[in-house]
Amino acid sequence: MSKRLSTTVLGVAVLSLVTFGLPATASAAQHTKAERTVTDVIPAPVEAKADPRANFRLNPATVIRTDRDGRQVGEYLAGLLRPATGYRLPVVTGHRGGGPAISLETGHASDRVGTEGYQLKVSSSGVSLRAKTDKGLFSGVQTLRQLLPSAIEATTVQKRSWVVSGGTVLDYPRFGYRSAMLDVARHFFTPAQVKLYIDQIAQYKINTLHLHLSDDQGWRIEIKSWPKLATVGGLTAVGGGPGGYYTQEQYKDLVAYAASRHITVVPEIDMPGHTNAAQHSYAELNCDGKPIPARTDIEVGYSSLCINKDITYTFVDDVLRELAALTPGKYLNIGGDEAHATTPEDYQTFAKKVQPIVAKYGKQITGWHDIAKTNPPVSAVPQFWGTTGTDANVAAAAARGNKILMSPANKAYMDMKYHPQTPLGLSWAGLIEVKTGYDWDPATYLQGVTEQNVIGVEAPLWSETLVTSEHIEFMAFPRLPGYAEIGWSPKDSRTWDAYRLRLAKQSPRWVQQGIDFYRSTQVDWQ
Ligand code: IFG
């Protein structure tokens, strides 16, 4: 070893001894018990083998080595690890080098991992993460994160050892569409609050965020051709609060932030019902052209666009055109639920006129499963939100080839109370304790809708009763990780008895992240 290099190595060893009082040798790591192992991860991986002899100790000399495609994920990983460790963790791209490393590579992974999966190997000499795409690397980073002590989630330097639990993982998702919905219409949540929620759901490999942008009580996205939708429709909220809206610049920034966490945003403009905010903003959208008052109560089903007026379709075309231009993802959600103020014939008329507009702007339709009765294009994705195991229209759509997004309200609606005394939430679909939210399967819930008819699962969070980020967190945690596991993990590896033990081990991470989760008595929290 050249003099300069040996001095450097010695320097690093001394540095780590002096600075962190830690033995810099790798061998010490092998005998340090890890707080977690690969079999504790949520969502449960397809294959995971722990090897306690192969623990890897992060140290001040550790580098993050990536190939070109892995650079962004490398920087993201560094951003996760630097605050609590205080280590430099430089991200080096391209040249191979010596020294302990976390390496992220695309292109050399088993075909089994597909576009979202990865292979992770933790040994005493370093960490190797391989995937076919950067999305797969991002998934692997979320697993790697859970192999470190929960203190890694702290935002200030923690003086301690950082042992990555040894072992190997080969992993990939069961469903490609794993989604959380946030209702920003009943109550408005700022871009910062949405970004916080994006970071919270990304750690469980959720890859889609459905934003419910319009409803009776508020319109939340700037539409330049109809400015009062935001400037008037955005002023209100349930309970009469201040409301708010995203300018198109802010919305683009949200979409980009989500994309940096490999999450696709699906925007929803709910139609033809749930439209009072729009019709309060523009009287010409009402059949009689007369203004209607803003609504800040939580009744549903009383509003409808005026189906037989031409201006309605000019409105829809303008809104969907501008929204499509803001949406890199392939779906626009056109709602369709609870159109009780629209006659069945008018509902069909509206569907026939509006669904082609989505296609005109190069997007595919998703919407509440009520759209199944309109015989939508086979590329449309009805989202099931019922509470019974049968729905003839949805089964017929599945038989026609439509993929179904599963979010049964009595299993997946995170705005349902945990128990009768839960201070937040509603209870019309039933109470959803943690086990109820976990112990079901999207491929067997509905008659006539089986594995190949299901595109994935979504956990909606309606905000009639939610105002702050703490409210979001209390209702989403601890249930959200369960929906993430339902969407990702093999069906036969999912049992409540095993899951509840893994879920308990997540709680120290949430404490470090400042997530005020509901301490269900069904789980022995750590
Ligand atoms: N149903 C309504 C939502 C919301 C919800 C609250 C759907 C598709 C009840 N529609 O769920 O707007 O009010 O749990």
Image (cartoon, rainbow, N blue to C red):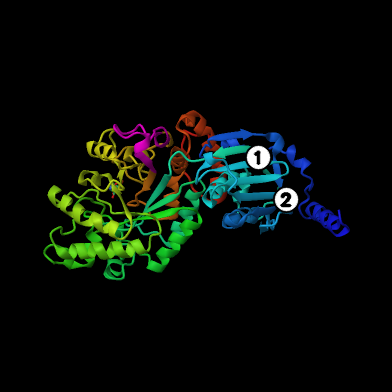
Look at mark 1 in the image and give the residue it sits on: 165
The stretch of residues the image draws in magenta is 436-457
Task: Give residue 59's mark.
Answer: 2
Task: Give residue 236's mark.
Answer: none
Q: Is mark 2 within 8 Å of ligand 1?
A: no
Give the mark, 1 or 2, whose residue is nearer the N terminus. Answer: 2
251 on left or right of 127: left
327 on left or right of 485: left
Amino acid type, callout 2: Asn
Residue farthest toward the right in the current orientation of the protein: 3
Q: Secondary structure at mark 1?
A: loop
Q: Secondary structure at mark 2?
A: loop
Amino acid type, callout 1: Ser
Q: Is residue 60 magenta?
A: no
Coordinates of residue 23 in the picture (x, y in percent): 79, 46
141 on left or right of 434: right
Coordinates of residue 137 in the picture (x, y in percent): 56, 49
Coordinates of residue 445 in the picture (x, y in percent): 34, 33
